Image (tube, helix red, strand yellow):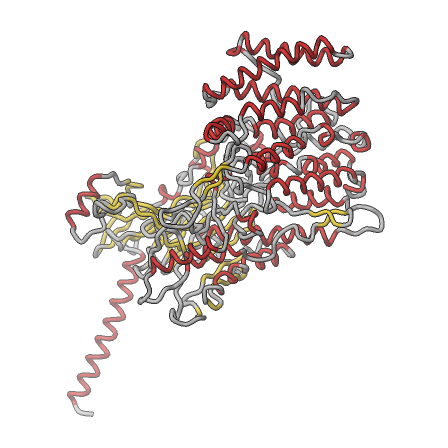
Amino acid sequence: MNRTVSLLLVTIIFLSGLESVLAQKKRKTNTQLEENEPSDKIFEGFFNFSYDSSEDRIYLLVDKLNEEFLYVNSLAAGVGSNDIGLDRGQLGSTRVVKFEKYGKKLLLIQPNYSYRAISDNPEEKKSVEEAFAQSVIWGFPIINSNNDIFKIEITDFLLRDAHGVIGRLKSSGQGNYKLDESKSALFLDRTKNFPKNSEFESLLTFTGEPSDDWIKSVTPTPSNLSIRQHHSFIQLPDEGYKKRKFDPRAGYFVGTSYQDYATPIDQPLEKRLISRHRLEKKNPKASISEAVEPIIYYLDRGAPEPIRSALLDGAKWWNQAFEAIGYKDAFQVKLLPENADPLDVRYNVIQWVHRSTRGWSYGASVRDPRTGEIIKGHVSLGSLRVRQDFLIAEGLLAPYKKDVNYNDEMKEMTLARLRQLSAHEVGHTLGLAHSYSSSTEGRASVMDYPHPLAKVKNGKIDLSEAYDQKIGEWDKVAIAYGYEDFPDNVNESEELESIIQNSINAGLTFISDQDARPIGGAHPYAHLWDNGNSAIEGLKDVLEVRRLAIANFDLDNIPQKTPLAKLEEVLVPIYFYHRYQTEAVTKLIGGLDYRYAIKGDSQLATQLINPEIQNEALDVLLKTISPKNLVLPESIIKLIPPRPIGYSRGRELVKVRTSLTFDWLSAAESAANLSLSLLFHPSRAQRLLLHHARDSSQPSLESVIKKVISETVFNEPLTGTENEIWKIVNSSVLKSLIQLYLNEETSSSVQAVLQYQLKDLTQALNELSKNAKNTDLKAHYSYLKSELDHYKEHPENFKMTTSLPLPDGSPIGSGMGCSF
């Protein structure tokens, strides 16, 4: 070896050593700027940070100045009350933010992506940015800096009520709470760092005076409420995602929308995009292809068997829809890896959530607000909801007879419900909205709300078809619209339109929440918790199932060694088994058929409902307030004693006027009030008037009122318990008509019709009272007339007995849930 070569080797070795030293120095700089600064734990990842255990402090090193990233807050550990709505795993808002330096501090700034100028002209972009406000989320004093790396402390940022717990407690009437910093701390077990996301968690304690039973029922010391909040800093996805336009016919939520001020004047200013996961075929031209990166969901290990297997199976249904558009194993479901954090953005999660009552489940997601791209799907499934199906099965089957075993049948029904639930909520995290007309199209979508389908076969109730076992045809259409990967030489807009048109030609429709949820709604097919191609036939079937279940109801509806008072829990969902199908039928009366039609497509715009169908709907609806259908047999009434010690009256029982004893008359009153309040809704009354004005063959408001009065007040009096129900139904009819008149939303035209009909009714009641055959009838008719007289003389001060509401039915609590 000559001297030149030897010198070269020495130089290389020296430089290599120097490079190693510099690399070590750089790593040290990136985690801790000064050796003597307190830190006993270093977290390297997306944003490097350190933790000082002596002071319970976290220091962040910001090396991405002016670079946007995502900030998400969420609840790692919740309150446990469905009514309050602060659940384990609940996602908060997703924001695009960035650190900017101003003097001696860094500001965490949220740009305003609701208003943009998508243009190559920087001045045009700037004009929009300066026209609308941005938000400064937090300010951080700079502790020190080195080579454009800034050290800040983020402890106070993490130890704050980022999720809005205080506001939620106040708005739900739980009391005025405040954050107690002396009882709050950083939670290191769930504080972690990864290459593309930094995760922080804190234990927060809120102190105050509780003012409601909800918070008292779920907190060991209600004045001290301790939960955990989670904060995520997430790297924004790259620009490889392909945005897809929103179409109101396609079955998706609006994932993101914004106004683009660079839009030509002949184009819409507002842009709407759907939310979807990034999914691409390895070979877009192939009929079947694997995905470049499949969508993988992970199930919470806290779900026990056989629930775990049912949830896995239901979520996997979605692969059927992806297979239909040529993907192979593009959608997968696995168990969450041990010790994985369900709030880690790297995992799409199906989480099993416990509450003190049954309640809503949710399908939420972390989305890029700029594009709508779903970065993380997060499903929260309420663990107690399935028990309602088991309770319904107990009521329908009376399963505790000797030598009869319905246990397997009941369990299979509940597991079928869980499969459906899992598929439904995962569907939301794929970007899909509710599809409420699908129940009338052969269960075309798991995104509908399914009521258990019970049938009468050979004189017995059969639950073998209670829930569907697969993805629906509409679901395949929606997935095709959102996830089909089109080759570069294909016109995407034309192909998307073709998907929609083919579904229309196949007779599939999509109607969502704003049309199905209002009780004054008009759509004949969009309902929650209904079954059957025809709402009328569905109600007839439900009433027959209900009749048979009540006829068979006895001690065999509860297990041995169960307090007899518990029979009421089983009876209630059976007695009110028709409640949702009743609402579906009511929407036919004064209803309007329509679609989310677009100019140029072949869909129906609007169409009045056939008058014969409306008249039939009214006839069937009146059966729901018939005393013969509302009466309970003596054999049931005498079996239900008052609640024993240790068993209070809960919210899912009949609201009573008898203090302690079972009140069969109040049950009938609640059921009658449901049907009548639905029928005599201001919106429905107004439509009856308008539709009759357009087409005289349409039922008029006057004819509907006369029909109801004729079938109730003017009907033949009955005897015994049916007579008492007949009287309470008459009172409910009168009350509903007066309340419709006094409602602020009722038009003067509707009031005119009501006033005239009530005047006629007053005269008729006067005659009925005079001609009554006994004192009981005379008293009843006189009471109804006196109420009408009081209403006419002093309408502003008129009050009737408060209507008894139904026991809680559709998952307990507020309607804040996005799903069932």
Residue at left 32%, top 48%?
Answer: 96
Can you give x and y, in whole percent of width and height, for residue 709 in the image?
Answer: 63, 22
Q: Nearer the viewer, residue 233 or 52?
A: 233
> Total of numbered circles in the picture?
0
Q: Is residue 156 visible?
A: yes
Q: Nearer the viewer, residue 15 or 474?
A: 474
Q: Is residue 35 left or right of residue 174?
A: left
Q: Which of 475 and 662 is in front in this view?
A: 475
Can you give x and y, in whole percent of width and height, for residue 426 in the image?
Answer: 50, 53
Q: Is residue 208 visible?
A: no
Occupied quadrant, residue 554: top right
Residue at left 24%, top 79%?
Answer: 13
Can you give x and y, in whole percent of width and height, for residue 248 in the image?
Answer: 40, 47
Residue 704, above or below 588: above
Q: Is residue 236 left or right of residue 183?
A: left
Occupied quadrant, residue 196: bottom left
Residue furthest out toward the bottom: 1
Residue 461, above or below 702: below
Q: Is residue 216 left or right of residue 287?
A: right
Q: Which of 439 and 592 is in front in this view?
A: 592
Residue 294, above or below 474: below
Can you give x and y, in whole percent of width and height, for residue 73 in the image?
Answer: 40, 45
